[in-house]
Amino acid sequence: MRYISTRGQAPELEFDEVLLTGLARDGGLYLPVTWPQFSADDIRGLRGLSYPELAARIIGPFTGGTIDPSDLDEILQESYRDFGHKAVAPLHQLAPSLWVMELFHGPTLAFKDFAMQFLGRAFDHVLQKRGERVTIVGATSGDTGPAAIEACKDRDAIDIFFLYPHERVSEVQRRQMTTVTSKNVNALAVEGTFDDCQDLVKAMFNDTAFRDEIRLSAANSINWARIVAQIVYYFHAAVSLGAPDRPVSFAVPTGNFGNVYAGYAARAMGLPIGQFIIGSNVNDILPRFFDTGALTMAGVTPTISPSMDIQVSSNFERFLFELYGRDGAATAAAVTEFREKGTLSVGDNLWQRAQDTFDGYCLDDAETRSVISDNWRSSSYLLDPHSAIGVAAAQAKHKDEETPVVVLATAHPAKFPDAVKEASGVYPALPPSLADLHSRPERIEVLPNDLATVQQYIRNHVSLVGAA
Ligand SMILES: *Cc1c(COP(=O)(O)O)cnc(C)c1O
């Protein structure tokens, strides 16, 4: 299985190289040359498998032999072993054709654990085999950092540094990073915003000497291995609800477009999916695109669903590439136009195709709170703000009552307790694995928003300086 860049100018790579590389050298994102195909019989054959077994069936074809099948099985068994629910991704029925898939039973209570637990282990495995090490540096607005740190702590071949905006992440999110004591883990509070953190990371990647010196690598949402791990739960839900013999629709609270893109990939692999419904908060660049055919930047407004306070959805480029008939030059031109002018129109034909694939719906904070309180009062079911947006989007845009719709619940309500309490009157408790989070000792490292200072800090704390 070989991988190509969405911008058509980077070398084709194998899975292990794509894993370690992240972003392609031409600035594009990697995608498989062709989608592995699952026939109706193949899909029936997935019934009754445990979650890690199912994951091995789905991920195996993407690795193209670069990870030994028995090693892959072991990696996947370990990745999902410590989830707080035996079903790993349980389905909860809210209404006759409305289901919630709980993707928040991982160690940091957000769906990002599904991909990160796999990514950290896959990284470590490939690096150990090659006798190499890397330093992962990333920026987080709250959920990616904890998931990446939890997945990479104590992995021998990895040092990890995550930058977060000082005093601008929730207490749970901060503590999930600052209470980890592993030597290879560094959470850094930057005196600035999330955008400042992201600019620092970008600048480090653009500093070639520094990049080579510390063997810089990324675990951000454009990494192909993260998408691959997310494809699995679309199969899991659909097979549980009757696929391939009846289609299933999905409603996905969306920010960087990685999660819903994994669903798009599942459909390309043969899974019968009805609708894809995208939910967003007032940062609604994607619903506006599906409504108008124009992708137009606007400022970011902070909301009670902060993991979706995003202006430019990085994974959207993968969908644009498909929309432009897998033409790398056309995709590169479109992305450049968008960056320069802040807007991009795809024309009526492509807009029509995009609309046939996705429906979008957006909610403001007041509407989100009332979805949380309605569901609590009618079903005693507590939704976090992101998942609530998914539920509302499903209810508003679901077309065919015969086809069940599955909402991806992307975070545990206890991850956003203040917003949930304000909406429902209930303060959600942390699950047992994190019950003592607020009494664990914290180590907070505050750094100025200054590239040279942050780089020097990383140099001083990385364990591989001087190593080949
Ligand atoms: C990251 C995140 C999202 C957005 O997912 P994308 O893959 O970026 O679209 C939604 N909800 C929660 C809780 C998240 O952490």
Image: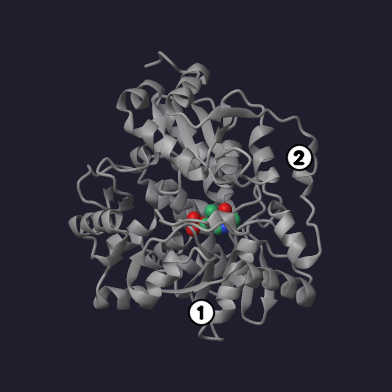
Which three-letter amino acid code belongs to the residue tagged 1? Arg
Number of residues whose C-alpha sits closer than 10 Å to that of mark 2, classed few (under 14), some (14–19) or many (20 or more): some
Number of numbered callouts drawn: 2
Residue 115 vs 313, above or below: the answer is: above
- Residue at horizontal 52 percent and vertical 56 percent from the top: 309
The answer to whether residue 73 of the structure is visible from this angle is: no
Horizontal side of 225 relative to 161 (left or right) equals left
Residue 262 at x, y = what percent?
44, 59
**Residue 437, numbered label:** 2
Which quadrant of the structure image shows residue 111?
bottom right
- Residue at horizontal 79 percent and vertical 44 percent from the top: 435
Q: Are marks 2 and 1 in contact (CB under 8 Å)?
A: no
Select label 2 or label 1 by which is in front: 2
Q: Which residue is mark 1?
A: 246
Quadrant for ligand 1?
Answer: bottom right
Q: Quadrant of the C terminus?
A: top left
Between residue 79 and residue 442, name the one nearer to us.
442
CA gap, disc 2 to disc 1? 43 Å
Residue 270 vs 12, above or below: the answer is: below
Between residue 244 and residue 361, name the one nearer to us.
361
Between residue 438 and residue 401, name the one nearer to us.
438
